[in-house]
Amino acid sequence: MTERMKSIGQPFERGEKNEAFAAYFTGQSYLHPLVNDPNLEIEIGQVTFEPGCRNHWHIHRGGYQILLVTGGEGWYQETGKPVRLLRNGDTVVTHDGVKARCDSRQLVFTHCHNCGYIGMAGAGF
């Protein structure tokens, strides 16, 4: 864990470079799986965005996403709505079929995502 991460009080380690989903991000992100049980229709993981990193517009189909901001500052936006500034302790629920995106500001931005799926449909970019 870097000194920068320690300074914003992260509850979990940063994780590995998010190579599996790198095509859906501009900039570097890191993924730390927290719950990945094939018998559950839910995934929980921590995503860390380096300064200036953003994910592309995407839709969670057949379920939802809950963001729990655990450090730094970032932006969240749904299609047709204003950008929302997110800080440590903020939460967001993205409902089925809503197109949204996140990005970081000048600081590291970290959130835990909690994706519940009906039939494990997943996210579409």
Image: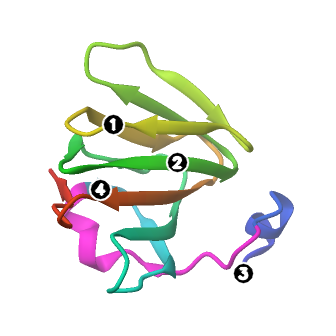
Query: For the magenta stretch, what is the residue range?
Result: 11-24
Mark 4 and mark 1: Cα distance apart in space = 21 Å
Magenta stretch containing residue 17, yes or no?
Answer: yes
Mark 4 and mark 2: Cα distance apart in space = 17 Å
Reading the image, the residue beneath label 1 is: 95
The amino acid on which the numbered mark 1 sits, given as a three-letter code, is His
**Labels 1 & 3 near each other (Cβ < 8 A):** no
Nearest the camera: 51 or 91?
91
Q: Which mark is residue 67?
A: 2
Mark 2 and mark 1: Cα distance apart in space = 11 Å
Disc 2 packing (10 Å; few <14; some 14–19; many ≥20): many
Q: Which mark is residue 1?
A: 3
Disc 1 packing (10 Å; few <14; some 14–19; many ≥20): some
**Labels 2 & 3 near each other (Cβ < 8 A):** no
Disc 4 packing (10 Å; few <14; some 14–19; many ≥20): some
Return the x and y of residue 88 as percentages of the image width and height: 73, 44
Q: Earlier in the sequence, mark 4 or mark 1?
A: 4
Q: Relative to 59, is 1 on the left or the right?
A: right
Q: Earlier in the sequence, mark 4 or mark 2?
A: 4
Q: Earlier in the sequence, mark 2 or mark 3?
A: 3
Quick one: SS at disc 4? strand
Mark 1 and mark 3: Cα distance apart in space = 32 Å
Return the x and y of residue 59 as percentages of the image width and height: 21, 43
Mark 3 and mark 4: Cα distance apart in space = 22 Å
Q: Which mark is residue 25?
A: 4
- Determine the image quadrant of residue 14: bottom right
Q: Nearer the viewer, mark 4 or mark 2?
A: 2
Magenta stretch containing residue 48, yes or no?
Answer: no
Return the x and y of residue 90 as percentages of the image width and height: 67, 37
Mark 2 and mark 3: Cα distance apart in space = 22 Å
